[in-house]
Image (cartoon, helix red, strand yellow):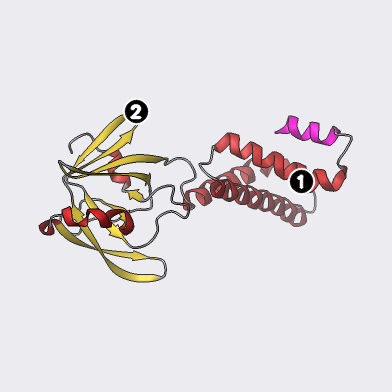
């Protein structure tokens, strides 16, 4: 990044305005992309917003320190502490966003019966804390539009109701089913979960349709056939 900034400054064309409002943001986007490898443009925009928020926060902290102490001689003693606070704040902010890259989209197979298998792209979501209230089993979510053609193959006796809370809705009931098994692609192999609980949501899970299912994070720690 520093080398890129030096090269940008030495360019004989563009002018200060272009370099400041086009060159530097573009250079930052390239750096963020190669460091974090976001899966789509939305995640890249979120990363950029978080980075600029951190820069403004750090700059404001330094200005306040200067006004508070009346000098800048000791500012470098506190700079590592301020930088550490900004980095931690960015980490928390990114964890609260849509899991920008640490939880990738994977392929999942929902085996409803020996002859009925639904294949769907899914996302590991650390924010999914849904559990079936009786057994305590983790609940993964799939869009109603995806599951609807296979609904007739779901056994009525496996139906479960799962209470949930979400933003904009104080409480609700999620219709869920226990299927025969689920297979999830993980690190070059398949993780197999017996009798998983699958909740059916009427809401769209992803804006662009990159994935249509949300996996419970507890399943990631399981071994095959457990």
Identify the residue under disc 2: 188
Percent coordinates x, y for residue 117 in the rendering: 23, 43
Residue 93 sits inside the magenta stretch: no
Residue 4 sits inside the magenta stretch: yes
Going 86% across and 45% down the picture, which residue do you hit? Answer: 16
**Direction from residue 182 to residue 215 in the image, left or right:** right
Viewer-proximal residue, 86 or 133? 133
Instruction: Check contact, mark 2 vs mark 1: CB within 8 A.
Output: no
Identify the disc placed on residue 22: 1
Establish if 162 lies above or below 138: below
- Gap in Å between the C-alphas at discs 2 and 1? 41 Å
Going 74% across and 56% down the picture, which residue do you hit? Answer: 68
Q: Is residue 74 visible?
A: no
| Residue 104: quarter of image | top left
Going 30% across and 64% down the picture, which residue do you hit? Answer: 164
Neighbour tally class for label 1: few under 14, some 14-19, many 20 plus, Cα within 10 Å: few
Establish if 77 lies above or below 152: above
Tell me the element at label 2.
loop
Percent coordinates x, y for residue 132 in the rendering: 21, 57
Percent coordinates x, y for residue 220 in the rendering: 30, 40
Residues in magenta?
1-10
Q: Earlier in the sequence, mark 2 or mark 1?
A: 1
Establish if 27 lies above or below 169: above
């Amino acid at each position: 990044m520093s080398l890129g900034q030096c090269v940008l400054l030495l360019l004989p064309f563009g002018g200060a305005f272009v370099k400041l409002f086009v060159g530097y943001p573009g250079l930052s986007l390239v750096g963020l992309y190669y460091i974090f490898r976001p899966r789509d443009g939305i995640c890249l925009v979120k990363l950029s917003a978080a980075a600029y928020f951190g820069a403004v926060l750090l700059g404001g902290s330094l200005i306040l320190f200067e006004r508070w102490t009346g000098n800048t001689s000791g500012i470098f003693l506190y700079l590592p502490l301020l930088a550490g606070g900004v980095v931690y704040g960015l980490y928390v902010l990114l964890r609260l966003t849509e899991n920008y890259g640490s939880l990738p989209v994977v392929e999942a197979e929902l085996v409803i019966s020996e002859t009925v298998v639904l294949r769907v792209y899914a996302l590991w979501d650390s924010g999914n804390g849904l559990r079936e209230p009786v057994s305590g089993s983790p609940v993964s979510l799939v869009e109603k539009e995806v599951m609807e053609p296979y609904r007739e193959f779901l056994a009525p006796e496996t139906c479960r109701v799962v209470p949930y809370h979400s933003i904009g809705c104080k409480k609700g009931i999620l219709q869920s089913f226990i299927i025969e098994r689920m297979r999830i692609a993980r690190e070059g192999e398949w993780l197999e979960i017996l009798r998983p609980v699958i909740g059916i949501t009427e809401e769209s899970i992803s804006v662009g349709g990159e994935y249509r299912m949300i996996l419970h994070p507890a399943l990631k720690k399981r071994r095959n056939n457990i």
